[in-house]
Image (tube, rainbow, N blue to C red):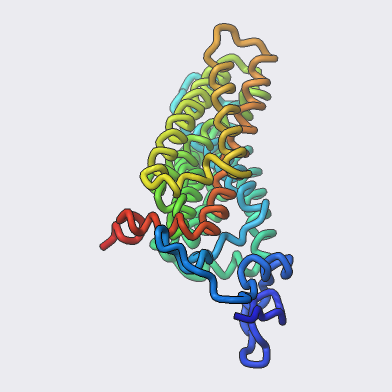
Amino acid sequence: MIAVTTDGRDIDLEVAKLSGEGALQKVRPVDTHMQRVAREWGKLPTPDTSDPTYYGRPVLKEPVWHWAIPLYFYVGGAAGASLVMGSAAQLDRSGELENLMRRCHWAGIIGSALSGAILIYDLGKPSRFHHMLRVFRPTSPMNMGAWILSSVSPSAIVAAMFAQRRGILGAFGEISGVASGLSGLALSTYTGVLIANSAIPVWQESRRVLPILFGASAMASAGSIFDMFFEDRAARRVTYTFGTVGRAAELAASIALERQAGRVPHVARPLHTGASGFLWKTATVMTAGSLLLSVLPGRSRKRRVAAGVMGTLGSIMMRYGIHQAGVASARDPRATFRQQRAGHGAAELD
């Protein structure tokens, strides 16, 4: 097998032509990509008959996302959870949580706008985001994610402007606040559905837990951020409860995810080894430390800030760890073959 080195898409331009939007994408750096995926064989390798694969070559394409997408997962999750918290705060009629409500709405507005900017940066040009909105396809998590992201800011802006007013405008603002909370709930969890809807073994094996993990982590993220910067006593009770429940749920979901992925031991290897294992374990330690600081007696400002910082770092590192685990899992052909031989993965759909 002779590696084609004409461009970053492994296409020999003498026999094929690149055209269309996809032709603009390149794999960088080309040399690293070619060495890993399209190495020359001096001789045909001898297969391992005790644990056969296709000559040790990866079966799946690894994710091409870079650093921006895990960051998008975090920012979008925190923004969505903030809107959920703001929607819940509307249930209070004493007026003590109006400031919290307003800040939640603005956190959702700024966070969703920043999420859109990060996503467009990853796509390369704004028109690609626009093109995803030309269709409405409920069976596509990516298409639904674009629609969810587009619906968050308008409802949150209306809620921020009118939710505290009286009369018809106030009622319209409250309805918009509920709508923004529902959109925020979808925004904080759909990214887990997105990566679970793939053939990559570690993601596919833990598909039932990933949306729950991302939603719980979003709660922990929003609670951590508000806990660090909000001094109002009544609001702190809400943010403390919201964040503490999120941290506990995130830890429980992390344990459940490891068990799900560990049904085929080799599939769970990226969660225990390499860079992905380091990120995953560190995220777990950070989240556990944040939860411990939250539940200990006494609520000094220094302790709240420390718990918030650890909770934030835990949520960010969890997303980067999940992403890196997907890359490592796609590169490992034995994860794919052993998952299929165990009757999991696509075989479960038969």
Name the one closer to the observer, 153 or 193.
193
Q: Residue at x 66, y 60 (%)?
A: 122
* Position in image of residue 271 (x %, y %): 52, 42
Look at the image and tell me whether residue 179 can be seen. no
Q: Quadrant of the N terminus?
A: bottom right
* Nearer the observer, 292 or 217: 292
In the image, 87 versus 118, the foreground residue is 118
Residue 234: percent from left, percent from top: 55, 16
**Across the whole image, how many numbered discs are drawn on residues?**
0
Answer with left or right where residue 248 lies relative to residue 1. Answer: left
Q: Give the residue furthest to the top.
A: 297
Q: Position of residue 130 (x, y in %)?
A: 59, 67
- Kindly identify the residue that appears in the image at 62 percent across and 73 percent down: 38
Left of 311 or right of it: where is 29? right
Q: Quadrant of residue 240?
A: top right
List the single residue furthest toward the bottom.
14
Task: Pick the residue in front: 318 or 39.
Answer: 39
Considering only vertical position in the picture, is 296 above or below 77?
Answer: above
In the displayed structure, would residue 350 be above or below residue 154?
below
Residue at horizontal 51%, vertical 27%? 247
The quarter in which the C terminus is drawn is: bottom left
Q: Is residue 137 above or below residue 284?
A: below
Q: Residue at x 71, y 79 (%)?
A: 5
Could one spot residue 185 in this view of the protein? yes
Residue 262 picture location, percent across and down: 40, 42
